[in-house]
Image: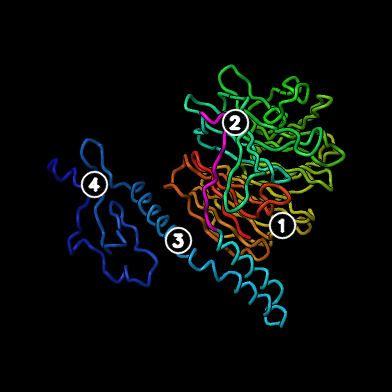
Amino acid sequence: MTGARQSAQESDLSDEECPSTSSNTPGEPSAPDLPGYYFDPEKNRYFRLLPGHNNCNPLTKESIRQKEMESKRLQLLEEEEKKKKRAARMGFNTSSFLRKSQLGLLSVSSYCRLAHELQVSCMERKKVEIQSADASTPPSDPFSLILVDTNSDRLFTVNDVDVGGSKYGIISLSGLQTPALTVRMHKNFYFTNRKVNSVCWASLNHLDSHVLLCLLGFADTPGCATLIPASLFTSNHPGVDRRGMLCSFRIPGAWSCAWCLNVQANTCFSTGLSRRVLLTNVVTGHRQSYRTNSDVLAQQFAIMTPLLFNGCRSGEIFAIDLRSRSQGKDWKSTRLFHDSAVTSLRILQEEQSLLASDMAGKIKLWDLRTMKCIREYEGHVNEHACLPLHVHEEEGLLVAVGQDCYTRIWSLQDAHLLRTIPSPYPTSKADIPSVAFSSQLGGEQGIPGLLMAVRQDLYCFSYI
């Protein structure tokens, strides 16, 4: 074969080589895969995948997949623009649903689902202006993680920096009001050249008074779990939660962390390690270790009962009774199983059910009384990332960002997919959005909606 033919990107199949057109009828979802060939749905034809010239062939499976995903993303963005024109009818439609519900033509559950679906579908993306404490140097570092506090008036951020590593900051959401969406980024005090594996708010002095971070160790530097007072980012008064109050505990590399709000252990936090769970009391420094059979990738404490739920790489979910000793035989009080690594856990308010997601893209709702899966939420995409779940029970919504960079919103009650939100940027493993959802973004008088951080930008999807 000549060099010119080797560098060709596409090569049509001859009539003898091409499979029967009956296998590609429009009614079928996709054409059968043929080794060494690629089927273009737009041209309705097969093309040969060639090795290319100088080991450079743009027509690869990865590039084809990327092209298809980008085409889908642009199509969804175009559909969103069309939805804006229909948003004006939202008030009329909501009133119509309410009237039908009052007349008995709609059940309460159907009314709630339709009202939520209408509200969520009409959420419009608007860019948020981030005002820095130093106006001469506007924020330019890309977001890798955002985490809203309990009252939804502060946003803890982890930003990647050009020289490697991360820096932390807190954004005040008090100015997040329509029509002008403005927030204030407070001065950043901390920088680390280590990877931030897990973050959660910690209530040591009062609700969400600190931030707990787990940093991955490297070379001769051990991993650590660090408590940073949130007031360090916002307070200008000397003697109030100054740097001397920062607590740091050496640990092996941690995959996950959680802070306990149960009254029996409300000064403790947990870290999920490789084949071990480590429970640490911040005040006394006492530690309790529980050996496991697999890496612990997700954790959450129950509030009403002294239980710590853990999700493992093996797919196992188990609960630790905090009253039991680590050397005992029966400290695993609950055991559930997924077919893939569990990456996120969320206990619902009544603590009778548990949401879990895994690396196969499965999101399941488990009944903790019967130990059975009672609902599955379809559409989530994950292959190997630790992606969080976001639950808002008052609004009856479940939110998750997939590895395909799409943010999906489901009805918590019936698992109906209400909205699929594409990223404003092309799909990339390095640009998976981080989101936060609340019914009061900005505090008690705030707006309900979704915050999305991607690259250097922050977007708000609000509905009223």
Question: In terms of image quadrants, where is residue 409?
Answer: bottom right
Tag nearer the camera, 3 or 2 = 2
> Can residue 48 be seen at all in this image of the molecule?
yes
Find disc 2 in the rendering and name its residue: 133
Q: Amino acid at mark 1?
A: Glu
Q: Residue 81 has which mark?
A: 3
Do the residues under discs 4 and 1 have CB atoms within 8 angstroms? no
Residue at 50% from the left image edge and 38% from the top image edge: 456
Q: Tell me if 280 is positioned left or right of 128 in this view.
A: right
User: Earlier along the polypeptide chain: callout 2 or callout 4?
Assistant: 4
Q: Amino acid at mark 4?
A: Leu
Q: Amino acid at mark 3?
A: Glu
Q: Residue 135 has which mark?
A: none
Q: Which residues are magenta?
A: 124-136
Q: Circle 4 sits in a helix, a strand or a loop, which is it? A: loop
Do the residues under discs 2 and 4 have CB atoms within 8 angstroms? no
Find disc 1 in the rendering and name its residue: 393
Find disc 4 in the rendering and name its residue: 50
Do the residues under discs 3 and 2 have CB atoms within 8 angstroms? no
Q: Circle 3 sits in a helix, a strand or a loop, which is it? A: helix
Question: In terms of image quadrants, where is residue 100?
Answer: bottom right
